[in-house]
């Protein structure tokens, strides 16, 4: 078995997490976008609400994890 370095594990984890997050967010955005094309105004209003909720949630996540992202960036610098 090959032992991966801490840097290799970090890079691999970052890649997997980044792709998962991007794929998930893209699917949610596509779901909302398609839902907002619905001919039923009641359905469109619900998707508009979902869009605003989604945007607010993303803002909160960014705010909460901003410091953690900066910490990860510093850890990455130390590994170089």
Image (tube, grey):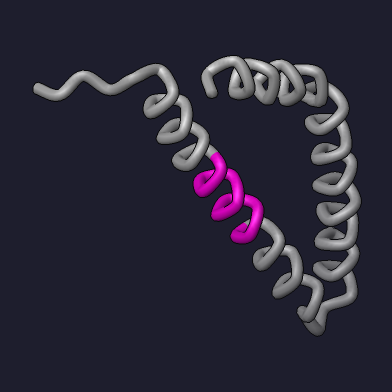
Image quadrant where one finds the N terminus? top left
Q: Main secondary structure of the magenta part?
A: helix
Image quadrant where one finds the C terminus? top right
Q: Position of residue 54 (x, y in %)?
A: 81, 47
Task: State which quadrant residue 75 falls in.
Answer: top right
Q: Given the current orientation, which residue lies at the most extreme bottom position? A: 39
| Residue at the image point whose x is 55% and y is 55% from the top | 23
Task: State which quadrant residue 61 falls in.
Answer: top right
Left or right: residue 76 compared with residue 36: left
Left or right: residue 77 compared with residue 52: left
Q: Is residue 22 magenta?
A: yes
| Residue at the image point whose x is 77% and y is 79% from the top | 38
Left or right: residue 27 compared with residue 8: right
Q: Position of residue 5 (x, y in %)?
A: 33, 20
Q: Which residues are magenta?
A: 18-27
Left or right: residue 17 compared with residue 39: left
Q: Position of residue 68 (x, y in %)?
A: 73, 18
Q: Position of residue 43 (x, y in %)?
A: 81, 68
Foreground of the two, 39 or 31: 31
| Residue at the image point whose x is 71% and y is 61% from the top | 29
Q: How many marks?
A: 0
Foreground of the two, 78 or 58: 78
Question: In the figure, 53 relative to 45: above or below?
Answer: above
Foreground of the two, 34 or 44: 34
Q: Given the current orientation, which residue lies at the most extreme front position? A: 80
Q: Is residue 68 magenta?
A: no
Foreground of the two, 65 or 11: 11
| Residue at the image point whose x is 51% and y is 34% from the top | 14
């Amino acid at each position: 078995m090959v032992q991966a370095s801490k840097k290799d594990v970090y890079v691999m984890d970052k890649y997997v997490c980044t792709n998962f997050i991007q794929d998930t967010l893209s699917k949610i955005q596509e779901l909302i976008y398609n839902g907002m094309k619905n001919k039923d105004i009641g359905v469109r209003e619900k998707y508009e609400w979902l869009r605003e909720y989604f945007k607010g949630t993303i803002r909160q996540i960014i705010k909460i994890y901003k410091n953690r992202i900066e910490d990860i960036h510093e850890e990455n610098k130390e590994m170089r």
